[in-house]
Each structure stands twice: as C-alpha cells, then as structure tokens.
C-alpha cells in the first residue's frame, strides 16, 4: 500500500489544499502539468460567476467609488460636486466629534460583542448539555433576533421611560426607584443602548455557538469524563478550545454589527441626549442629511470603514492562529 | 447519461447563463438610464403629504379630480424625519413628486435652492393672489425676492396645555389671560404640583434632535431680546448680511439661561430629554405630568386620547417678570414644485387649488390646522377645535413672536441648537458655552455658505 493519501479505490490520491479552493495543489500552483480549471469546461463556470460579479459591481463597487469621490469633494447632497482634495479628511481627523463618535462606536461594538458572546455561550452550553425544555428555550432565546431593529428600538424606548416604562416599573417594585431616566441621562444612555443591542443580538450568537458545540464529537467528552474531568472542566478545557474559531468569528461579526448599529441607536435615542449616543454612523447621517455636508460625512465613513477592515483582518488573523493552535 | 445529452445540458446552461447575464445588464442599464424630469402624461399629479395632513389632502384631491376630468391625484406619505433630511435627494431624483413639502427652515430647502432644483412659483403667487393673502409675512417666504414656496397652513406653537383638575387640587391658580407672569409663579406651581404627586412640564425633548427646546428658545428670544437683536438673529445668515449681535451676547445667552433656570428649578418632567413627542403626550394624557408643551393642533390630539380630566392652555413666562411669551408663528408647512417633476403645470394647479378659501376652510376642519391665508378667518371655522380658535384669537389680540428656528436655515438653527440644548439641560455645558458653540457654528456656516 502506498504511504500517501489513498482514494476509495486504493489509488494514490492527489493532496488537496482547502486554502487553494479545493484544487489539486500541484495544478493550483502551476508548477507541473496543466491547470485543471483551464479547458473547454472552464468558461461556463466563469460565465456563471458573471451575474454575481455584476451585482457586486453595481451594488457594492460603484457606491464605494462614489463614496470615495464624495469624500474628496464638497457636496451638499444634490447638484455638482466640487473637488476639494484631502480637505475633508484633514478636517475630519481634526474634529473632536469624529473621535468621540469613534470612541462610542468602539465602546458599543466591544461591549456588545463581549457581553452577548458571554451570554450566548452560557445559554448554548446549557442547551447543549440537554437541560430540561431545551427545545423550547432554543426558540425563546432566538426570538429577539427576529424582531425588526426599529420595532425593538421603539419598544425599548418606551420601556426605559421613567415611571411608565416596564424597566422602571420592575425596579420600582423591588424598591430601586421608578424615576430613572435611562435614555435622558448621558451617563446611562449608551449603556441602555448596549443592553438592548445585547438583548436583540444574543439569539443569533446563541444559535451559531450551539451549532458549533453540537459539532464537538461526544467521544471527546467521554474521553474527558474518563480522565476524571467534571462538567465545568470539560467546558473550559474541551468545549471552548474546540469552538474557538466559531467564537472568534461571532465576536468579530458582533463587533462590526454593533459598531454600525445605526437603526437601533436612531430608534432609541436619535443620538441623544446631546451627543451621548452619537456613534460613527449616526454622526455620518447627521453630518450628511441634517447639516448637508456630504463631503466630511463621506470622509468619516471611509475612515470608519478602513478601521473596521483592519479590525476584521486582525480578527481573522487571530482566528486562523487560534485554529492552528487548536 | 449519454455524452450527447451532457453536451445538450451544457448548451442549455450556457444559454441560460447568457440570458441571465443579459437580463442583469438590461436591468442595470434601465436603473442607470432613468431620464430625470421627462414630461409626464398629464394624467397623474403626485403630491407629498404628512400623515396628520392626509385627510385634508384626500379631500382636496377628490375635489381637484372632479374639476379636472381624467386627472388622478396620487398622495405619497412623507415622514417628519424625511421632510427635514433626505427629501432633497427624492426631489432631485428622476422620480420626484409634482408637489413637494419643503419647509423653509429645513436642510432640504437649503440644498434645493443651492442646486437650483426648485421651480419659481411667481405664476402661482400671482394667480392665487398670495402676496396679499399672506399679508406681512409674504416676503419671508421668498429667497432672493423669488417665491419658491407656497405656505399652505399656519401653526401657532409654544402653547402649554395644563390639567385643570391637577391645578385645582394642588391649589395652583389659573394663569390670568393664558399667561404665567413670572418664573416665580411657574416655580410655585410646579412645587405644588409635585407635592400633589404630579410631574411638571412634559416636553418631547428627544424627538427630531430636541426641536422642542428650539421652540422654547424661540419664545424666549422673542420675549427677551431687543427687536433689533432679534431681527439680526433672524437675518444675519442671509447673503450679504453682516452679523451685529453675536450668539455669545446677552441677547441670546439670557434666553438660554432662562431654560436652564427652569431645568434647575425642576420645571420639566422627569426624563424629558429622553422622551419623544408621543411619550410626552402620553405622560400628560395619562395624568403623570400636569403640563405639556405643544401647538394649536395638540388640543385636537389630546382630546382624541380622551384624558380623564379637563384641560386648558397658557404661555410660559419670559425672563423679565410681567413680560410673558407670546404664541410663536410657524410658516414652515410650504409646498414646492421640483424642477424634475413630471407634471410641473399640474403640480402648480394643485397648489392653487389647495390655497383657495374653500380648501383652506376644509383643512381647518379635517386636520385642525390654521389657514395660511388671511382671507379665511379661523374664528369663523366651525370644524376647528375651540381651543385652537382660542389660541388664534389670543394671537390676533396680543400678537405673535417670530420663531428664530422657524426662519433660519435648518443646518444653522434647528438641527444644531436642539442637541446643544440637550447637552446644556443635562448639565454637560453652561448657557454661555452653548452660546459660544452656536457662534462658532454660525461662523463655520457663514464661511461655507457666504
């Protein structure tokens, strides 16, 4: 029998690289032999990609080009643009409001990602462990995720009202006072938004993490149990390391989504009180549509986008390192 | 499967792929190739309307259609947020309505004027006699001497509605002639109301960037600032004008301080900075707050909520005792015709139709709005809420205040000052700092707008 990988018929199989998109490693690198993708059958494959590419160009590429163009121009939202060079970027980078909003976006993004990942992991672990009524909880935990963000915002905006809101009503019942103005106080408004973002986002993270946990082979836990590891030890030493790639992806996605949580913030506070909840997308919206300054708004969007791309790249790199470590 | 059938399937797939690609290119080309402003067929006139105004628009549309056989009026809803933000993009697009709502103090109006995207309405004004019908305020609706707007209703704002039973039970005297004479009178009233378990003045401070604080500032400026200073605040942004009174001067800061004093004395209901208009109204109608800041239409809205108490209205005090505020007049509900409208002439005809005395009278009955023209006397309108008529009668007898946020462009006034006042009332900055920020913002605005 050959030493290398063997296919079902006992022949020596060609090693396949996942990173190379499943192509034969040799062919993919073009060092030896013809590339398998070339040939009479390759062009229908490329043709099939055309619609997707067109959609990407029309709905993603062109807007990005237009955004970049706007960021280097003076534009009031309609009419002709006037080329300005890097003026909008210089002004934006020197604007305290930009840095404050970026800070709030980062706090919201990281706070939500950490908070909801911890909660979702605990919930997924409970369901994965087969607690009683798991199938019902599975649905209940996911329910907030299917509510439209605007409706969620309106519901919670009412719930946070002093005296009449359900949050204060509950606090009042347990003797903690019912006059807390959660959304009117600059010290609490962003955290109220964060709590709602966690409430609405936890369902998706829970579902993804539950899927990852249920993919861990039972034999691994059995081996752990045989080695004398208790449930908590198995969770920290087996479950968490094995779902780390999915966990890091969830954290990354939640950071990005919460960083950009315009709809929720707008429905809850419209950025107020004052600028206490003005995250970067809210600043961009206000600058563009309320002040009519589309150039600086576009520059702020581009800078925010670059930061998110960098964060995503860093997250992916960390995720891939963790995968290798695991 | 035989080789021939495989080849056949391949051909079909290739054709399908080509067809799909071609279809997408065609859709893309159609999307990109819309010809803005192409002439309409003259059979449909598209009109923007806000939800509160839809009944009157439907009524006018019905009569307009009857008088113009073959013409259909299509009413499209416009939200309050859209009206002040993204409407310029809609009106400059190839799908612009024929009649648009463009408030003179909104960002879209500034954008549309800069882009020369609105039709001059000289012919409409002449045909409908609007110069005379609008009276003394006619010229304030023009830009550079040209009317691009036609006002279709009037609003008197800064009326405070109060719970009569709560006032009586707390021992608060009824404000004489609908006016609180001094801050002390207001503070005494709030203290008594709070002792009786009621909250103070409910304000929808979170709605549309805190525009209600801009309202109160308007009333204070009109009551406190010297007429020349007020005139300067209201016009120094205009092309060619030079600022004579700064926003850091006492004429402006004193009015900011007045709002701060009320905040410090607990006049406002708990959480007012985070409450929307609806929530503030609910606080009042549910009996939680004893007072509500509103306008002439609010009386109708409060009645519809069927509160378990009677209510009346009064005006807040000015900074000087014995010199209370007046109702502030808003002329911002204005029609415009986009240059890219498909049926410009039909749109203009609809506006003329809306401004006839008959339509203006119907408007009062159907939406509670006061007429925009002086040829219709609100006191004679049977359908108008009696309290709205009362406010109108008061304004007629005592006068009205000019609203600074109503006449300055949105990016300069209303959009900026609301969040600043939210900050101030939350204790994050002093009235003097709010004035400094306003002055800096004014200078930036002037630098970029001339």
Image (cartoon, rainbow, N blue to C red):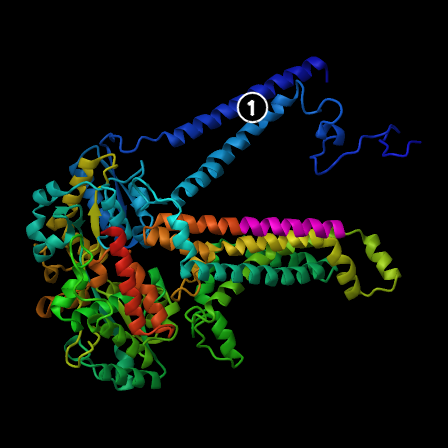
Q: On the rendered structure, is B370 left or right of A184?
A: left
Q: Residue at x 14, y 46 (%)?
A: B147
Q: At which x and y percent is residue B412?
A: 27, 58
Looking at the image, which residue is at 54% across and 32% down?
A52
Question: Please, is residue A81 above or below residue B332 in the view?
Answer: above
User: Which image quarter: residue B8?
Assistant: top right
Q: Is residue B123 toward the left or the right of residue A86 in the image?
A: left
Residue B396 rendering spot, x and y as whole percentages: 10, 66
Q: Quadrant of residue B441?
A: bottom left
Picture quadrant where residue B243 is located: bottom left
Mark 1 highlights which residue?
A: B17
* Magenta extent: A308-326
Q: Give percent across and percent down for residue A255.
A: 56, 55
Find numbered disc 1 in the image and state the secondary structure of the residue it sits on.
helix
Check the image and report above or below for B98 versus B408: above
Q: Nearer the viewer, residue A59 or A134?
A: A59
User: Residue at the top extreme?
Assistant: B4
Left or right position of B286 against B116:
right
Check residue B288 for magenta coloring: no
Q: Chain of mark 1?
A: B
| Front residue of this view, candidates A150 and A67 | A67
> Measured from the top left, where is residue B153 in percent x and y?
18, 55
**Is residue B22 in sight in this rendering?**
yes
Residue at screen point 21% across, 47% down: B335
Q: How many marks?
A: 1
- How many C-alpha atoms fall within 10 Å of the one at disc 1: few (<14), some, or many (≥20)? many
B297 or B424: which is nearer to us?
A: B424
Considering the whole magenta stretch, tell me its main secondary structure: helix
Could you tell me which quadrant the N terminus of chain A lies in? top right
Q: Is residue B307 visible?
A: no
């Amino acid at each position: 029998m050959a030493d290398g990988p063997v296919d079902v018929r006992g022949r020596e199989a060609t090693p396949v690289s996942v990173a190379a998109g499943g192509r034969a490693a040799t062919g993919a690198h073009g060092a030896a032999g013809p590339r398998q993708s070339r040939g009479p059958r390759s062009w229908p494959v490329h043709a099939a990609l055309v619609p997707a590419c067109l959609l990407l160009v029309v709905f993603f590429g062109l807007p990005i080009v237009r955004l970049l163009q706007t960021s280097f121009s003076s534009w009031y939202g309609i009419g002709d643009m006037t080329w300005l060079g890097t003026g909008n970027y210089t002004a934006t980078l020197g604007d305290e409001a930009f840095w404050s909003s970026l800070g709030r976006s980062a706090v919201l993004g990281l706070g939500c990602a950490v908070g909801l990942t911890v909660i979702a992991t605990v919930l997924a672990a409970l369901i994965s462990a087969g607690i009683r009524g798991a199938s019902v909880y599975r649905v209940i935990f996911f329910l907030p995720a299917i509510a439209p963000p605007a409706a969620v915002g309106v519901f919670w905006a009412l719930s946070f009202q002093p005296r009449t809101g359900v949050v204060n009503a509950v606090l009042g019942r347990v003797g903690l006072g019912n006059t807390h103005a959660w959304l009117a106080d600059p010290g609490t408004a962003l955290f109220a938004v964060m709590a709602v973002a966690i409430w609405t986002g936890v369902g998706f993270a829970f579902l993804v993490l539950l899927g990852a946990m249920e993919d861990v082979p039972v034999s691994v836990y059995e081996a752990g149990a045989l080695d004398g590891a208790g449930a908590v030890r198995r969770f920290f030493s087996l479950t968490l390391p094995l779902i780390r790639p999915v966990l890091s992806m969830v954290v990354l996605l939640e950071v990005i989504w919460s960083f950009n949580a315009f709809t929720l913030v707008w429905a809850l506070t419209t950025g107020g009180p004052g600028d206490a909840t003005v995250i970067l997308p809210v600043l961009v919206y206000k600058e563009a549509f309320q002040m009519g300054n589309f150039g600086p708004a576009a520059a702020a969007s581009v800078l925010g986008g670059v930061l998110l791309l960098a964060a995503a790249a860093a997250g992916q790199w960390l995720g891939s390192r963790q995968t290798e470590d695991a | 499967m035989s080789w021939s059938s495989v080849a056949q399937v391949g051909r079909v797939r290739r054709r399908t792929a080509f067809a799909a690609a071609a279809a997408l290119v065609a859709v893309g080309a159609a999307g990109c190739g819309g010809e803005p402003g192409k002439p309409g067929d003259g059979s449909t006139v598209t009109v923007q309307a806000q939800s509160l105004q839809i009944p009157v628009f439907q009524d006018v549309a019905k009569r307009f259609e009857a008088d113009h056989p073959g013409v259909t009026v299509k009413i499209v809803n416009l939200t309050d947020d859209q009206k002040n933000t993204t409407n310029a993009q809609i009106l400059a697009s190839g799908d612009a309505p024929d009649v648009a709502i463009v408030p003179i103090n909104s960002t879209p109006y500034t954008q549309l004027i800069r882009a020369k995207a609105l039709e001059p309405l000289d012919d409409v004004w002449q045909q409908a006699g609007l110069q005379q019908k609008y009276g003394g305020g006619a010229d304030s609706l023009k830009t550079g001497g040209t009317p691009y707007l036609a006002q279709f209703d009037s609003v008197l704002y800064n009326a405070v509605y109060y719970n009569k039973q709560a006032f009586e039970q707390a021992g608060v005297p009824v404000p004489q002639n609908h006016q609180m004479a001094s801050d002390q009178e207001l503070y005494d009233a709030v203290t008594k109301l709070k002792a009786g378990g009621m909250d103070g003045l409910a304000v929808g401070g979170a709605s549309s960037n805190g525009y209600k604080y801009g309202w109160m500032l308007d009333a204070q400026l009109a009551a406190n600032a010297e007429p020349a200073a007020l005139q300067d605040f209201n016009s120094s942004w205009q092309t060619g004008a030079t600022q004579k009174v700064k926003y850091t001067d006492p004429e402006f800061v004193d009015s900011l301080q007045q709002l701060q004093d009320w905040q410090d004395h607990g006049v406002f209901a708990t959480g007012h900075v985070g409450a929307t208009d609806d929530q503030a109204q609910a606080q009042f109608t549910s009996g939680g707050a004893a007072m509500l800041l509103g306008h002439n239409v609010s009386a109708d809205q409060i009645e519809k909520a069927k509160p378990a108490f009677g209510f009346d209205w009064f005006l807040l005090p000015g900074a000087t005792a014995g010199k209370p505020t007046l109702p502030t007049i808003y002329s911002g509900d204005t029609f415009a015709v986009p240059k890219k409208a498909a049926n410009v002439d039909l749109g203009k005809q609809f506006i003329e139709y809306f401004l006839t005395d008959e339509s203006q009278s119907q408007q009062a009955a159907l939406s509670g709005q006061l007429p925009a023209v002086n040829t219709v006397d609100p006191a004679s309108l049977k359908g108008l809420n009696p309290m709205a008529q009362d406010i109108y009668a008061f304004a007629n007898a005592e006068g009205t205040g000019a609203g600074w946020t109503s006449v300055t462009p949105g990016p300069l006034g209303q959009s900026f000052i609301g969040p600043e006042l939210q900050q101030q009332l939350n204790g994050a900055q002093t009235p003097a700092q709010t004035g400094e920020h306003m002055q800096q913002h004014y200078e930036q605005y002037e630098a970029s707008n001339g």
